[in-house]
Image: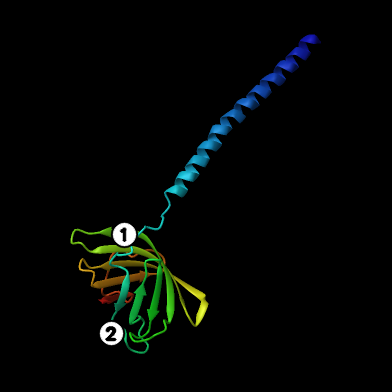
Amino acid sequence: MANRDNTKRSSSRRSLLFYDLHAAAAIPAVFLFCLIFLFAIGCATRPVAVKPDDPLFGTWVNDQHEKPGSPFFARKVISPDGRELNYDFIADSEPSSECHNTIDKMWTDAEGNHWYHIHIIGWQYTDQDLKVERFSLTRVNAQGTVLEQLNAKFDYPEELSPTDVNYTVFYKKE
């Protein structure tokens, strides 16, 4: 009977040891999972810091949009703080809509053109509860005088296409 008690105790110790080994193995696995999760969060797209003198910022106009029913604004003012004010007509004193812009990516090509991926959340002043999300591929020419923009609903466009109905051009107003 003593042998059986020793066998039971020995068996209990083995199962506890087995359990302890599994628990000990789980700790590094959980730690590794947490590290991978933190790494993934750290690598997520973050807004790009853009200098206040970047050519994107300023007042942009297009007098071709200066007509009732135009799908584009005639004037937009883009600020370094991410704010964009849009005006139906160039001479309007009050904006008709506002946007919050987040620049997710910025680069300069070999010709000196400035390119941006801009995540836009916009709303009309008549209905501030209705917000619209857009993804914009934007290019400002090397001289900083022409802004081309193509907006999409779900992801950044891969290229600027002047034939796309969502493509527009603005000119820097000094």
Compare residues 20 and 121 and report the one nearer the observer: 121
Q: Is residue 45 left or right of residue 170?
A: right
Residue drawn at 30 percent across, 74 percent down: 164
Q: Is residue 36 above or below residue 124?
A: above
Residue 163 falls in which quadrant of the image?
A: bottom left
Residue 162 falls in which quadrant of the image?
A: bottom left
Badge 2 is on which residue?
63
The Cα–Cα distance between marks 2 and 1, rounded to whole angstroms, is 28 Å
Q: How many marks?
A: 2
Q: Is residue 68 above or below residue 118?
A: below
Q: Residues within 10 Å of mark 2 (few under 14, many from 20)?
A: few
Q: Is residue 46 above or below residue 172?
A: above
Query: Residue 83, image x and y in percent?
Result: 41, 70
Q: Is residue 26 left or right of residue 105?
A: right
Q: Secondary structure at mark 2?
A: helix
Residue drawn at 22 percent across, 68 percent down: 141
Query: Residue 59, image x and y in percent?
Result: 31, 76
Which mark, by number, is residue 128? none
Residue drawn at 31 percent across, 71 percent down: 149
Query: Residue 42, image x and y in percent?
Result: 44, 48
Badge 1 is on which residue?
106
Badge 1 amino acid: Met
Q: In the current view of this chain or complex, which residue is farthest to the top? A: 2
Q: Quadrant of the N terminus?
A: top right
Q: In the current view of this chain or complex, which residue is farthest to the bottom? A: 68
Q: Residues within 10 Å of mark 1 (few under 14, many from 20)?
A: some
Query: Residue 36, image x and y in percent?
Result: 48, 42
Compare residues 83 and 5 and report the one nearer the observer: 83
Q: Secondary structure at mark 1?
A: strand
Badge 2 amino acid: Asp
